[in-house]
Image (spheres, grey):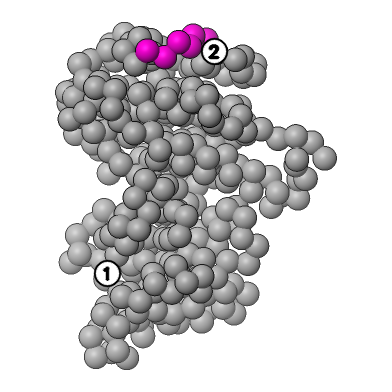
Amino acid sequence: MSQFIPVVGITLGDPAGIGTEISLKAITDPEREKNFTPVLFGSPEVILRDLTNFQIDWKIKVVTIDDDLTPVEGEILVVATSGAEALIPYGNVTPAGGHAAVAAVKTAVEFCQQGKINAICTAPLNKESMREAGYHFDGHTEMLAEYTSTPSVSMLLIGRQLRVAHVTTHTSIRQVPEKITKDRLKSVISIAHEAMRNYGIKNPRIAVAGLNPHSGENGLFGDEENLVIRPVIAEMVELGLDVRGPASPDSVFIESMSDKHDIVVVAYHDQGHIPVKLIERDFAVNVSGGLPIIRTSVDHGTAFDIAGLGIATYVNMNEAIAMASRLAIGVKQNAGIEIL
């Protein structure tokens, strides 16, 4: 049996936001457990700026993919994915901020694919800055899918009481029904099953929420449940998965909090986000399911309005890093590798 300490790459997001601040505070917190090795991906100049601004007395060591990533106390390992051009004023939308955020993610993916790091945890980027830089991704999930050549991914939110996987996310309500296909639903159920196994649940109990009120009332309020959702559930059960539903969307989360389900597959963005954000607050972590790599993220934005003030909370970043480490350990265990 060998000791395994996951190496978690932390991408710093838009340098005009709070990403660097919360990342530095999280990894230099004297109270944190030393159960992962952090490696930051971003601009060394921005990191030095924030170390000074927030009075964090640590040094940085710039490393490359060929270097040993063993940490030294009081030293932060940094992969330079951008430089002084990323030293933009806090709170500003700029192409430089978009370029810096995307470059950090792209390089972290390369490190992960080559086995230099075990997981990626992303600080928030700004979509407007990213688009001014010429990138037209809807967010991190779509970017990671392209950079890993992954055809089907799902946004998961994992908290302490509620866990959800989304069939659709950033799309209009009018388009949701046509996007809930049998193939897409099968894919998301499979992604949820794998994610929960990596989370540490051997036989996950998966509830599928209905699209319509009361799951359609046998076609009274809509037929998506009868035409798509029920047949897919039956098929997944035949494959040996514990899948239930379609469950009424107004009660399935109460059932989950009563330990009847381990994760809920939801039809659209707000069906999952509203209950999770209401119940979990700072403890919900965004996980990209279906990728060949592990990626977690904070469940909030760049907070341009408070960037640079030193008042950003890093509770959610702590949770996101811990989740990345936990999932990396789960992948090893599910592969039959015994670890301490």
Secondary element type, mark 2 = strand
Q: Is residue 56 magenta?
A: yes
User: Looking at this view, is 130 or 271 the one in front?
Assistant: 271
Does residue 323 appear left or right of residue 141 in this picture? right
Secondary element type, mark 1 = helix
Amino acid marked by disc 1: Glu
Q: Mark number for residue 291? A: none
Name the residue tied to disc 2.
Answer: 75
Q: Is residue 302 above or below residue 212?
A: above
- Asked if disc 2 and disc 1 are in contact, CB closer than 8 Å, the reply is no
Q: Quadrant of residue 326?
A: top right
Dividing the image into 4 quarters, which one contains the N terminus? top right
Does residue 240 appear left or right of residue 99 in this picture? right
Name the residue tied to disc 1.
Answer: 178
Q: Is residue 99 above or below residue 339?
A: above
Q: Residue at x 37, y 54 (%)?
A: 280
